[in-house]
Amino acid sequence: MIEMRKGEAGRAGNLYYLSFHLPIMEKIVRFGVSIEPELLERFDALIHAEGYGNRSEAIRDLIRKRLVEAETEEGRGTVAATITFLYDHHSSDLVNSLISIQHEAPVDIKASTHVHLTHDLCMEVISCIGEAREARRLGDRIKSLRGVLFAETVYTTPEVFGKEPHKH
Ligand code: NI
């Protein structure tokens, strides 16, 4: 099955043409889905608003997202995760606790970004690679600290996209 994407339109003399870059390595399978018309209408409106050019890419993204969720729910597999959190840096001992927790965590913290949001509030984003359960544990520990006002962990799983994470 050939999938058309990244189309280019042009004109050569009196001929108008459309050309497409075809994925060479990927094998694509087509399948049919039975769905209520109202549900499809809502889905189409949503993905159109999100900027998708076609349903296929939107459905592939949904499937990948669900596969990442399933793996991280089970706490297994290697994930690349970001933990975004907001905290009041005046809270006593909070900054020290945050640093100790990160040093002790059995995940590979690749980067940490600190933004001074207001006089009191800081936002930090940690990017890490490690076992799903350890990334979740790190996010949970940060979230439960007194003075942390918001924390959310977002996971992605390189394996779901058919790629091995870099070891370095
Ligand atoms: Ni700050």
Image: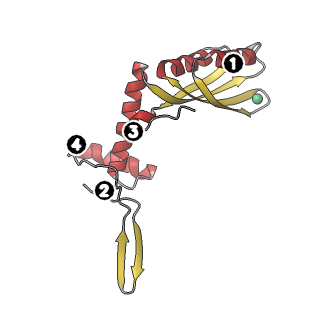
> Which residue appears at 22% of the width and 42% of the height?
35
**Which is more foreground, mark 1 or mark 4?**
1
In the image, taking residue 123 as reference, residue 162 lies left or right, namely left
Confirm or deny contact between disc 2 and disc 3 (CB under 8 A). Answer: no
Who's the residue at 39% across and 64% down the image? 7
* Number of other residues with Cα within 10 Å of mark 1, as a class: few under 14, some 14 to 19, many 20 or more: some
Which residue occupies the extreme front position in the image?
168
The image shows residue 155 at horizontal and vertical percentages of 49, 30
Determine the CA span between mark 4 and mark 2: 25 Å
Q: CA distance from mark 3 to mark 1?
A: 34 Å
Please give the residue where the numbered disc 3 appears in the rendered image. 162
Q: Quadrant of the C terminus?
A: top right
Label 4's element? loop
Where does label 4 land, which residue?
A: 36
Q: Amino acid at mark 1?
A: Leu
- Nearest the viewer among 96 and 152 is 96
In the rendered image, residue 32, in percent from the top left (x then y), is placed at 20, 46
Residue type indicated by callout 3: Gly
Q: CA distance from mark 2 to mark 3?
A: 19 Å
Residue 98: mark: 1
Label 4 vs 2, first from the N-terminus: 2
Q: Give the image quarter of residue 129.
A: top right
Which mark sits nearer the N-terminus, 3 or 1? 1
Mark 4 packing: few (<14 Cα in 10 Å), some, or many (20+)?
few
Numbered disc 1: secondary structure: helix
Please give the label number shown on residue 3. 2
First in sequence: mark 2 vs mark 3: 2
Camera-near label (1 vs 2) is 2
How are the colours assigned in the image?
secondary structure
